[in-house]
Image (cartoon, grey):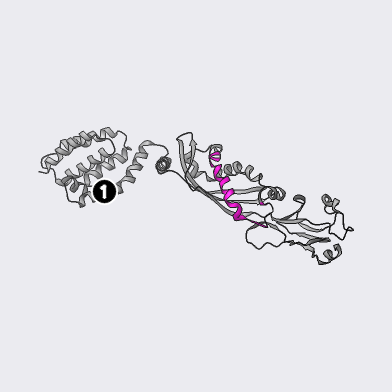
């Protein structure tokens, strides 16, 4: 009976695996009840490793090369020397192939804002995304902890777990980088390096190496983004507050003109009509004066504008009154004039239009 079983068996004399580019990380060679021929060959290509598993235990690991399979090749299996016993093959093992090349452009990203602690702002929430690359470094560990006896284990089977490992270490990376929260967007390389260092040990536990990490974008909360924009503006003028006010005023003029045009388009009130006239001659003169002085002494400028309004002669032109009114509204918006001061001066100016 044993002789008939031996005759019916298929003996495999060449074991090899050619990757097909389908994202396979681990591949079990299909035995289908067959056995490995004594003296057969095992071919492991570059970017591959092979693992022999006998009776559920890893017997040996092979790197790139071609091997003749004998009991001398597999010293762990020497106790299976039963070639002369009822014609049974000494190799009744499973063979697994592993791809050790880098898996590139794997994506990670925050599905929800991640709350981190910052020394300047306390608890803040950010979004970030990028990519990473990894490879199998320890096929034995990967087999015992991840892929197991699965006939084919793919990149997609592992992606969710690895993305989770990346995300759970974002807070650690920010803390270890020492980069202030507002500067994260400008220090993405350092952020990525710290994220890789924080996450790499978790990859090692799975038999993997985290080869690289990139951070492609860091999105700050809207309110902090505005502060960052202001900080950038300060950097443009070297930290000089007067120049920074000039910069902000220059940025506000187009918006102010748009708002004035919108108010004038309604045709509802004298104030609206005055705003709709745009930046008149008087406003241009005052703005030029403020820009040249760096807005240093804004209170004096407010007093000067208020005094000019109070001393306006009865024969003043309507356009000049409206331009002065427009300027006063601007000073109130900047907090230089109080609501009461603005209302008082507005009443005086409107009397000039009667």
**Residue tagged by mark 1?**
259
**Which residue occupies the foreground of this view, 134 or 92?**
92
Q: Is residue 20 left or right of residue 170?
A: right
Residue 154, position as x, y percentages in the image: 63, 56
Would you say residue 141 sits in the magenta stretch? no
Q: In this rendering, would 20 be left or right of 337?
A: right
Closest to the observer, 284 or 192: 192
Q: Seen in the image, is 75 located left or right of residue 297? A: right
Question: Which residue is pictured at 75% across the width and 56% down the height?
Answer: 94
The residue closer to the viewer here, 47 or 224, is 47
Crowd band around label 1 with a 10 angstrom C-alpha radius: few (<14), some (14–19), many (20+): some
Residue 117 drawn at (x, y percent): 49, 36
The residue furthest front is 1
Secondary structure of the residue carrying tag 1 is: helix
Work out whether residue 145 can be spotted.
yes
Q: Residue 62: tell me if it is visible.
A: no
Residue 145 is situated, as x and y percent measured from the top left of the image, at: 67, 47
Tell whether 319 sits left or right of 8.
left
Q: Quadrant of the C terminus?
A: top left
Outermost residue on the right side: it is 84
151 is higher (above) or lower (below) than 236? below
Task: Name the residue rendered at 77%, 62% in the picture.
Answer: 34
Q: Main secondary structure of the magenta part?
A: helix
Number of numbered discs present?
Answer: 1
Q: Nearer the viewer, residue 241 or 215?
A: 215
The magenta segment? 147-174
Please state, as top left, top right, bottom left or bottom right, where the N terminus lies in the image.
bottom right
The image shows residue 162 at horizontal and vertical percentages of 59, 48
């Amino acid at each position: 009976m044993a002789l008939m079983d031996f005759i019916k068996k298929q003996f495999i004399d060449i074991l090899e695996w050619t990757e097909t580019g389908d994202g396979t990380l681990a591949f079990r060679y299909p035995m289908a009840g067959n056995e490995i021929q004594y003296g057969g060959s095992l071919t492991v290509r570059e970017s591959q490793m092979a693992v022999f598993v006998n009776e559920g235990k890893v017997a040996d690991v092979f790197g790139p090369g071609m091997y003749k399979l004998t009991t001398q090749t597999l010293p762990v299996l020497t106790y299976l020397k039963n070639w002369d016993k009822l014609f049974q093959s000494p190799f009744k093992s499973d063979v697994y192939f592993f791809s050790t090349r880098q898996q590139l452009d794997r994506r990670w990203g925050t599905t929800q804002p991640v709350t981190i602690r910052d020394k300047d702002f306390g608890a803040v929430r950010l979004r970030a995304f990028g990519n990473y690359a990894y490879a199998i470094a320890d096929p034995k560990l990967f087999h015992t902890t991840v892929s197991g006896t699965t006939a084919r284990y793919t990149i997609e089977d592992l992606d969710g777990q690895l993305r989770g490992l990346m995300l759970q270490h974002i807070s650690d990376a920010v803390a270890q980088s020492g980069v202030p929260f507002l500067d994260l967007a400008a220090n993405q390389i350092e952020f990525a390096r710290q994220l890789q260092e924080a996450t790499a040990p978790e990859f090692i536990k799975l038999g993997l190496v985290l080869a690289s990490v990139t951070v492609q974008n860091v999105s700050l909360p809207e309110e902090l983004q505005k502060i960052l924009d202001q900080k950038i503006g300060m950097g443009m003028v070297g930290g000089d507050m007067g120049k920074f006010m000039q910069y902000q005023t220059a940025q506000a003029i187009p918006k102010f003109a748009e708002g004035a045009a919108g108010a004038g388009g309604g045709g509802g009130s004298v104030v609206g009509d005055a705003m709709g006239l745009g930046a008149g001659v008087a406003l241009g003169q005052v703005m030029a004066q403020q820009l040249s002085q760096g807005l240093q002494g804004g209170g004096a400028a407010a007093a000067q504008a208020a005094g000019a309004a109070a001393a306006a002669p009865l024969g003043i032109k309507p356009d000049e009154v409206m331009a002065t009114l427009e300027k006063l509204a601007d000073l109130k918006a900047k907090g230089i004039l109080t609501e009461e001061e603005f209302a008082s001066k507005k009443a005086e100016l409107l009397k000039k239009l009667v």
